[in-house]
Image: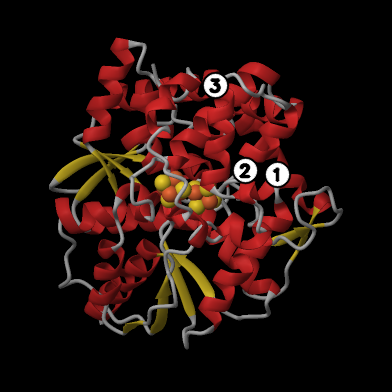
């Protein structure tokens, strides 16, 4: 019995909540709304009523469960270690079982499952994006929607790549004497939008004599479906990815997206709990999944000899699902501190949620922007020219907030700065 298949599965967690209210102090939703239902404690009370049969799931209640970025700040601040994020995800799955899926989400998740159709749509979209999007002039990478369709009229979205990342590379990127053969799970944002991040991952891995396998059959990680309670779609996507990587074989799996990492390390095993064959496969791959920062520190320590100088003053934003979800926060900083020329300056509260949270920012664009404003103010308090992070979704949110605040800063994945350093090192050595 998993959180995705039964609300009863979280009853043992719910009883541990003493309603102390510690979660209020850190919840980004509560800070903006000041409503009890925004905070973990309020949502746990609703789940208690549902479990006791004192209330029934309604559409209004389902909306309240959508008010959460799953940032896990409440979990980290809870004296009783109540996994509120899991309770909320279980409630969302229950809402879909009881009330059905919103028709627009239904279409989106169905398309995500039909990889070829989705791929065709994204490729076609890249050709015609100018009709719906207005490019931002200057060096910033992005565009705003020409029409307000409820996604946030000022949001700056990245441009759709003319050619998806996975179409740009062979299935195996070989190196002369491989130390390891790894699979690279790209996720959708890197494949269709931030191909520069994917290139940096491949450049850094090959610079460290690691062969990279990019299975063409991989697709969406399934997190958008699982956090919205569409368990059937999430399961289908998990199985497709597991089969795609199992067919190619690899000693490890590399992820450079915090949600993708969470999917492979934690969510697939839980989603597939009642299917023993796939559960075993999910457990096997979970044990050999690494975030790129983690891999370069713990598995194949990156070569510091070949680094060249990069002149950047950098502050680092911790993605929630990497920091609290996977316990990875020292590794990206260690990488940044190793790069000659990089000056790392911490912002106030680098682990504060940026408010993106995938589909949360689409369902609640105004709230998402308000949460981002606090993060942007923290960044503005530093004397830096670059914001580093380790997640494409955070990159989108931070870039949008910075552009709208008139702040001229690059937003890059840690590995992009490392790739710059290797490129500079190569250039220096060839002179
Ligand atoms: S979830 Fe944890 S922090 Fe929040 S009220 Fe319950 S026990 Fe307290
Ligand atoms: S996971 Fe984050 S947004 Fe959701 S209730 Fe906890 S602190 Fe609030």
Tag 2 or tag 3, which sits nearer the N-term?
3
Q: Going by the image, does 54 lie left or right of 395?
A: right
Q: Dot 3, how many residues are within 10 Å of its Cα: few (below 14), some (14-19), or many (20+)?
A: few
- Of the image marks 3 and 1, the number of the one nearer the N terminus: 3
Give the residue drawn at x 33%, y 45%: 81
Against 224, residue 346 (above or below) is below
The residue to which callout 2 is attached is 359
- State the residue at coordinates (41%, 54%): 199
How far apart are the two marked residues, 3 and 2, measured between alpha carbons? 30 Å
Alpha-carbon span between mark 2 and mark 1: 6 Å
Residue labelled 1 has its Cβ within 8 Å of some atom of ligand 2: no
Can you say whether 416 is above or below 29 in the image?
below
Q: Mark 1 points at which residue?
A: 363
State the image quarter where residue 399 is shown. Answer: bottom right
Mark 2: few/some/many CA within 10 Å (<14, 14-19, 20+): some
Q: Rounded to the nearest whole Å, what is the CA distance between mark 3 and mark 1?
A: 29 Å
Residue identified by numbered label 3: 52
Residue at 61% x, 65% y is 372
Residue 268 location, x and y as percent?
A: 38, 27
In the drawing, what numbered circle is on residue 347?
none
Residue 18 place in picture, x, y as percent: 42, 43
Quadrant placement of the C terminus: bottom left
Q: Specify the quadrant that holds the N terminus.
A: top left
């Amino acid at each position: 019995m998993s959180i995705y298949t039964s609300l009863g599965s979280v009853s043992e967690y719910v009883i541990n909540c003493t309603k102390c209210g510690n979660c209020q102090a850190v919840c980004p939703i509560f800070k903006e709304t000041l409503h009890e239902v925004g905070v973990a404690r309020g949502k746990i009370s609703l789940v208690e009523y549902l479990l006791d049969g004192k209330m029934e799931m309604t559409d209004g209640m389902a909306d309240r469960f959508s008010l959460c970025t799953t940032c896990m700040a409440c979990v980290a601040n809870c004296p009783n270690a109540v996994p509120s994020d899991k309770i909320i995800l279980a409630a969302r799955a229950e809402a879909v079982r009881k009330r059905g899926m919103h028709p627009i989400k239904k279409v989106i998740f169905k398309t995500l499952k039909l990889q070829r159709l989705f791929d065709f749509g994204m490729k076609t979209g890249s050709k015609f994006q100018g009709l719906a999007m207005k490019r931002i002039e200057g060096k910033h990478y992005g565009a705003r929607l020409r029409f307000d369709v409820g996604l946030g009229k000022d949001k700056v979205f990245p441009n759709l790549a003319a050619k998806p990342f996975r179409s740009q590379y062979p299935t195996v990127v070989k190196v002369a004497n491989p130390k390891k053969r790894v699979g690279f799970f790209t996720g959708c944002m890197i494949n269709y939008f931030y191909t520069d991040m994917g290139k940096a991952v491949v450049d850094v891995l090959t610079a460290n004599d690691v062969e990279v396998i990019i299975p063409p059959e991989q697709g969406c990680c399934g997190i958008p479906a699982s956090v919205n309670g569409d368990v059937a779609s999430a399961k289908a996507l998990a199985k497709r990815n597991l089969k795609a990587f199992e067919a190619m074989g690899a000693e490890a799996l590399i992820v450079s997206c915090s949600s993708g990492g969470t999917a492979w390390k934690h969510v697939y095993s839980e989603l597939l709990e009642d299917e023993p064959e796939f559960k075993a496969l999910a457990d096997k791959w979970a044990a050999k999944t690494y975030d790129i920062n983690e891999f370069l520190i713990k598995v194949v320590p990156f070569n510091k000899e070949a680094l060249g100088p990069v002149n950047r003053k950098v502050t680092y934003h911790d993605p929630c699902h990497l920091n609290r979800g996977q316990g990875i926060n020292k590794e990206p900083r260690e990488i940044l501190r190793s790069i000659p020329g990089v000056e790392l300056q911490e912002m106030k509260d680098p682990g504060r949620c940026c408010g993106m949270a995938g589909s949360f920012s689409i369902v609640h664009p105004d709230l998402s922007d308000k949460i981002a404003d606090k993060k942007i103010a923290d960044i503005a308090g530093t004397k830096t020219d670059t914001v580093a992070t380790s997640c494409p979704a955070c990159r989108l949110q931070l870039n949008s907030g910075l552009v709208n605040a008139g702040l001229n800063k690059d937003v890059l994945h840690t590995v992009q700065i490392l790739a710059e350093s290797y490129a500079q090192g190569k250039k220096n050595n060839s002179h």
